[in-house]
Image: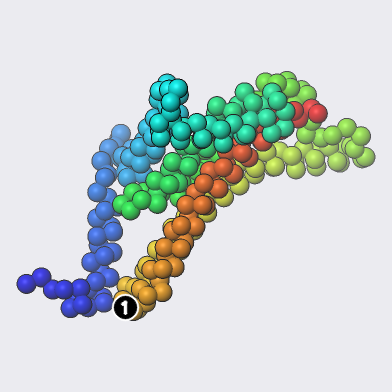
Amino acid sequence: MTPTLAQISQDTLREKILHTFEVARHAWEIPLHIGPIDISITKSIWFLWIGAAATFLILFVGSRLLKDRPGAYQVIVEEVYGFGRNLGGQVGEEGKKWFPYTLSLFVFILVLNLMGLIPNTYPVTANISFTLVLALLTFILTQYEGFRRNGAGTYLKSFAPPGLPAKIFMVPFMWGIEILGEFTKPLTLGMRLYANILAGHLIIYVFLGLILYFGTVVAIVSVPLSVVFYAFEIFVAILQAYIFAILTQVYIELAMFRDH
């Protein structure tokens, strides 16, 4: 006869749950190697692709299924578009040309954040490698737009404002500070997104994990608290997607109008 939950010792229950968690983590993995290079398709890659496909469906397909009498799907697409439309033109009207990118970035991160809250999925944005790649892309686009619009000479000269006293000392100092700032701004973007999403999941895991170590009596407190934090994580998922997108737009526009 299969033992009931009450008949299983606390150590055995903990071991079984942790084993199940470990098996589930590798369930989606497809091992691939090119020589010594590991390019295995892991659970995080699968959900990254699923998030990209969902973003495509929301934005691209939704924009081509517009009707005079919108259904629920079209209403969602239009609301997302209306919300994201305010991302462009934070510094100047010319910056609105980057709106399609920042809107797509907002929807993509939001989809991944919300998807990571579904049981048996993977929180892709809780992976620092992914968030730093997004931050690196922000850095590249920012510098590209700064050089393209202002020209190399004007853009680089703007790192040290005119009229500085003791130029022989202050100009190199200001250059160092500004260049460091250009690297740290996107770095903080990636770290902020990663830390907030990871921290939220860890808090929920900790509260539920208390049941494994102190018994089911703790569930009276830990489960309601986990539900509260889960609801709060939905808010954090939306907020962090918006912060990443809006700051990306601001950084690009600041580079565009750097000479001003």
- Which kind of residue does numbered mark 1 sit on? Gly
Q: Which quadrant of the view contains residue 102?
A: top right
Residue 190, image x, y percentages: 55, 45
Residue 84, image x, y percentages: 57, 34
Position of residue 176 relative to residue 1, above or below, is above
Residue 240, image x, y percentages: 55, 47
User: Which residue does the numbered mark 1 point to in the structure image?
Assistant: 215
Query: What residue appears at the point 32 percent right and 45 percent down from the top-left corner?
Result: 43
Residue 113 visible in rendering: yes
Q: Residues within 10 Å of mark 1 (few under 14, many from 20)?
A: few
Q: Which quadrant of the view contains residue 90?
A: top right
Q: Which quadrant of the view contains residue 49?
A: top left
Residue 52 visible in rendering: no
Query: What residue appears at the point 47 percent right and 52 percent down from the top-left corner?
Result: 234
- Where disc 1 sits, the SS reads loop
Position of residue 58 relative to residue 38, above or below, is above
Count the marks: how many?
1
